[in-house]
Image (cartoon, rainbow, N blue to C red):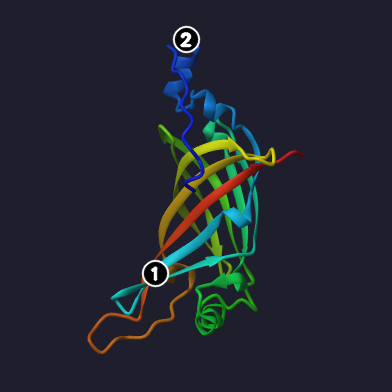
């Protein structure tokens, strides 16, 4: 995501109307307002992944490579921003085929019965500067629970092909057992083979939709 430089903008004194808008949490930065519109995640330049502690001493990292997205960002009224992401869980890639087969099997995602997991946003709050909090419903194995996702805006740019891109980093940590992912093994020395806590990571390069 380092290709996105933060866009510097001049700051002017707000008019009374704008000052009232600011008190309601409206983003007044012209660079953010200019991003208002529909966007699509550019998969070759994005990463939807996870990391989880393994055997108490190391971390396994993986990503999902097949997903669809619908994004709408409102820079003037961030509360109107929304996102929908559908991920095909069989596309998981941790770099080890045997491990991937276990993850999509019945012990974890059970991809044959539950081929997709989804995220549907329910609210977005501008927390200040270039940081937002998006709350939404995460569905895994037909279990839906709310999650809070911290999103940091990294900047925007027009690439050499004429596409307008915007970059966001998002993170959240979930307890996988709350979605029915309860498989584990006890270690002789104490603890478990796979941590219940899973960190989800969204490194997003989004392209403005033309339609």
Q: Which residue is mark 2?
A: 15
Task: Choose between 175 and 63: the one closer to the eye.
Answer: 63
* Residue 76 visible in rendering: no
- Which numbered disc covers residue 61? none
Tell me if 74 is positioned left or right of 187 in this view. Answer: right
| Image quadrant where one finds the C terminus | top right
Check whether the beta carbons of the residues at disc 1 and disc 2 lie within 8 A of each other.
no
8 and 82: which one is in front?
Answer: 8
Taking depth in this image into account, of 77 and 37 the one nearest to the observer is 37
Q: Residue at x 64, y 71 (%)?
A: 115
Q: Is residue 177 visible?
A: yes
Q: Position of residue 145 (x, y in %)?
A: 49, 59
Circle 1 Cα neighbour tier, 10 Å, few/some/many (<14 / 14–19 / ≥20): some
Q: Find numbered disc 1 in the image and state the secondary structure of the residue it sits on.
A: strand
Given the current orientation, which residue lies at the most extreme left position? Answer: 189
Foreground mark, 1 or 2?
1
Q: Is residue 206 above or below residue 192?
A: above
Residue 13, given in percent of the width and then of the height, sits at: 42, 11
Q: Residue at x 43, y 77 (%)?
A: 182
Report the residue at 58% width, 78% height from top: 110
From the viewer's perspective, is 140 left or right of 196? Answer: right
In the displayed structure, would residue 60 be above or below residue 102? above
In the picture as drawn, the residue positioned furthest to the front comes out as 160
**Residue that mark 1 sits on:** 52
Residue 45 in percent (x, y) is at: 58, 53
In the rendered image, the residue lying farthest to the right is 211
- The total of numbered circles placed on residues is 2
């Amino acid at each position: 995501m380092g290709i996105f430089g933060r866009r510097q903008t001049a700051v002017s004194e707000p008019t009374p109307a704008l000052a009232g808008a600011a008190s309601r949490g409206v983003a007044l930065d012209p660079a953010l307002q200019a991003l208002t519109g529909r966007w699509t995640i550019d998969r070759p330049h994005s990463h939807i992944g996870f990391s989880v502690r393994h055997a108490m001493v190391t971390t396994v990292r993986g990503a999902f490579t097949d997903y669809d997205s619908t994004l709408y960002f409102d820079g003037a009224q961030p509360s109107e921003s929304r996102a929908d992401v559908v991920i095909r869980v069989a596309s998981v890639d941790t770099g080890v085929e045997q491990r991937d087969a276990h993850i999509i099997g019945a012990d974890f995602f059970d991809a044959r019965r539950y081929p997709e997991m989804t995220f549907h946003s329910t609210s977005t709050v501008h927390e200040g500067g270039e940081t937002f909090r998006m709350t939404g419903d995460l569905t895994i194995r037909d279990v839906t629970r709310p999650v809070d996702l911290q999103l940091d805006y990294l900047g925007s740019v027009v690439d050499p092909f004429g596409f307008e891109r915007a970059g966001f980093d998002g993170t959240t940590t979930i307890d996988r057992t709350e979605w029915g992912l309860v498989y584990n093994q006890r270690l002789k020395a104490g603890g478990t083979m796979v941590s219940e806590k899973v960190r989800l990571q969204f490194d997003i390069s989004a392209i403005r939709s033309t339609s």
